[in-house]
Image: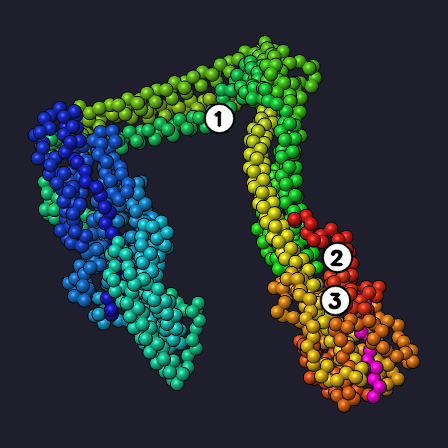
Amino acid sequence: MMQTPMLSCPLKATNEIDWIAPLKQYIRTTYGDDPERYADECAALNRLRQDMRGAGKDSAAGRDLLYRYYGQLELLDLRFPVDENHIKISFTWSVLSSYSLAYEKASIIFNISAVLSCHAAHQDRNQETMLKVAYHSFQASAGMFTYINENFLHAPSTDLSRDTVKTLIAVMLAQGQEVFLEKQIADGKKVGLMAKLASQAAYLYTQALEGVQDNVAKAIFERVWLLLVQFKTHYMTSLAHYYQALADDDANSHGIAISRLEIAMTLAREAAKVANSFPSSIPATSNLAGDTASILTNMAKTHLTACDEKLQQFNKDNDFIYHQTTPPEAALPAIPKLPAAKPIPVSELYQGQDIHRIVGPDIFQKIVPMAVTESASMYDEEKAKLVRAESERVEIANDEMAASLDYLKLPNSLNILKGGLDQDMAVDSDFRKWCEDFVGHAPFAQDFEQLNSSKSSIHGILDQCQKSLDMEESVCEKMRNKYGAEWTQQPSSRLTSTLRSDIRNYRGAVEEASMSDVQLYSTLRQHESDMEEMRSAGETDEADVLYQRAMIKVGAARKTGGKSPAAEGSLIDDIDDDEKASVTEQIAAVEDLLKKLTLIKREREKVLKDLKEKKAMSQENQLFKTELEKFRPHQQRLLQAQHKQHSLMKELTRTYSDLLSDKRVRQEQNKYEAFSRQRGTVMSKYKKVHQALMDLQAGLERAKNFYSEMKDTVDSLYKNVEGFVGNRKAEGSQLLNQIESGKTSSGASGADREQQRLKEMMDRMSMNPSSSPHQQQQPQPPSRPLHPQQQHSYNNYNPAASPPVTPGYGMQPTPSPYMHQQNYAQQPQHQQPQQQPNYQQHQQPQQPQGYSYNPTSYGMPTSYGMPTSPPAAQNQYFSPPPNQSQGHNQYGQMGQQQQNMLPHGYVPPPPPPGPPPHQQQQQHQQQQGYGQQPQQGYGQQQQQQQQQGQADPWAGLGAWK
């Protein structure tokens, strides 16, 4: 079996201290001796402390150095009180300091355990001798940790806490069990035995796992500890199932063996996962070797291969020979456990001569004889036992007497029988104090008005924030609907999600606060009248009047007669003379018994005090019994007092029962009980009123603080919302200016192109026979330069604006749309297709067939010339139907793409009616004769659309500029 890595506890670090000066000072002041006589002893103890700090962590010599210092501390504790009040030395371990010698001793024991664990973990367990040393050291380390848990109950540091030490005990025992299992596997023992040993090791690692997780979370252990314990938990459990499967196969339980091997395979894979996650660089404080990860990985792979081979073999044998069913995991019996490691006590670790050899002689033997010290210690212990036993008896007797008197309601019930109810009608001190707390308290109405005002202000700010965000989002979306893709501003919903979430959260918080306000107001309404009464009583110093009135209201006064309790008198005044003596004697007898019981209690306490303060005259061993015998009279007196108390209590019970058997006494007792209940009702009522006042004051103070903080918060939110909306307005205004500028430049460019296009159409449709084809190729006069900001593309043309072809020429009147063209060079960057004018609404009425078209009647300018019509043999282009795409063709190429023959005598249709676009109308009035007709053009339509848009309150983002 491969040697697995083992965990070892790191040592606690400590600072250097000085024993010499404090010890000399105590010897001088307490013993009255010359401290220089003990200079060598003080120096020896101080040198032991320094040697202990340099002890090796994995050697037996280091362990002995630590134990020698610990043994001398045990001897020192018998002579010198080392604490904050006597010999004051600050013991610093890790980052915590204490003046307690117990902390120093616990830290030394902890380091002894750590050295033992390191010594065990660094042994080469392939050698039998070293394997036994490791096995013994792990158990000894667990024993030392157990000693810490049993003797140091109040740990000042987390690494000495009971949970941490229990975890270390479990880890050390699990590793000792694992070492023993390694020896059995190496010796080839029976598989059933190895399964039990592995099962116990897995159980111990499972116990340690939870504690290691907690300590890793507290940064006490390194994380690699957790990974290693997780690996060993899976690995040992898998190993237990593996060996148990081999044992089951030997016992002819082949199906169970296969099921266990499958479980072993699953656990081995889990172990492999943990091994693969093990870090390659391991912290030095973990005390693990650098190749731990590779060792764990190889162990998991080797074990997984062995399980797989056995599983294949068992499956094959079962399929061909045994044919046994494979039970589920839940049906498998648990694997028995066999503990092989247990904590070794300190007394067994150092026995006989070993202690004297390691610890050495007592350093301070000269200052106080050791025999005397031991005798004094034994005597004090015996005396302490005696005092504890007598103190327990006295406490039990006092409790019995108090319980009996409380059951009999004595002596209060005697006071009622003797003096009536007048003494209990006085106002209670608590009630008077409650009334005084109401003095000077202003009404709560103003506070609630202030809360409502603050709440309304907060709601108003939140509503304004919500309204601003909604308006901004509405404007943005309307502009997006209007301008389409040209409106590139990001949608508001993505940007305002955090702000809207804050508004919802703040509104919800205010609503929850409102519910609390409602509860406070309900409390006020419920107790308002009682509060006013208590305030008035406190201010006028009439708390007793209010108390008496409340008692009368709940029925404390007698319904018949209406006399006050003071006027009613006592029971003794109301009874006859014959009966008076009997009742008076009984009351006197009860009082006498109560006095005797009180005296017994006082005497018992005095005797116990004398017993505790009594000192022995001699400290010799042979006089222990004699000295302890002198306490016998005290014990006898305490015992007699206890017996006397029992007899007096019996007599008191009998006498008081006879007293209560009287009819008038029972009536008075019932009246007193009723009075007590009514008094409790009054006090409970006004206690609730006083508590309501405290709750209202605290609740209103919390509410004011909450609304003040919430007001600051929503003010900050409002500033954020206003800043966001302002930024969005500025961004939208800039974007709107860009869009409007693009439209202006596009309108100017489109007007020039339309003018050029109409002229080319007129040239192609000319019927002048005198014009030669060469005239169609003559260069066109240059057009007017476009304004640099008025360039735009002109998209579609409605063919209904042109008159149809005359039917007299044998052709159907098919509309001919302009071909789609775009000037990409002059396209603005963020341009959207603009709404085109509908030329169909300007269509001329259809002319009769006799109508002849004369292009010269439109007054074309001479500077442009009038091209002649092409000959009959020349092809003519006609516009395609609307469902065909003819986009992106330049009009300069129209003459080269003619394919159809014109019929003889064809008269081309007139040009589209209406003036050119509005932006260029005044510039071309002298060049286009038909441009002066009153029909509405594209520019006018666009102007109307803009005028219609001005009716929209959101148009133009006027509020943003």
Q: Main secondary structure of the magenta part?
A: loop
**Mark 1 Cα shell of 10 Å, populated few (<14), some (14-19), many (≥20):** few
Determine which of the numbered discs, if any, sits on residue 219 in the image: none
Label pair 1/2, CB-CB below 8 angstroms: no
Q: Tell me, yes or no, whether the highlighted magenta stretch contains residue 817.
A: no
Q: Residue at x 51, y 20 (%)?
A: 412
Q: Which label's residue is closer to the chain start, 3 or 2?
A: 3
Determine which of the numbered discs, if any, sits on residue 836 in the image: 3
> Could you tell me the amino acid type at mark 3?
Gln
Label 3: state its secondary structure: loop
Identify the residue position indicated by label 1 in the image.
406
Camera-side residue: 583 or 482?
482
Judge from the rendering whether residue 229 lies leftward or rightward of residue 537; answer left or right: left
Q: Residue at x 18, y 67 (%)?
A: 126
User: Rounded to the nearest whole Å, what is the CA distance between mark 1 and mark 2?
Assistant: 100 Å
**Mark 2 Cα shell of 10 Å, populated few (<14), some (14-19), many (≥20):** few
- Residue 531: % across, % down: 63, 24
Determine which of the numbered discs, if any, sits on residue 946 in the image: 2
Residue at the limit of the structure toward the top, as seen here: 577
Judge from the rendering whether residue 921 lies leftward or rightward of residue 563; answer left or right: right
Label pair 3/2, CB-CB below 8 angstroms: no
> Could you tell me the amino acid type at mark 2?
Gln
Which mark is nearer the camera, 1 or 2? 2
Residue range corresponding to the magenta coloring: 904-915
Q: Residue at x 76, y 90 (%)?
A: 873
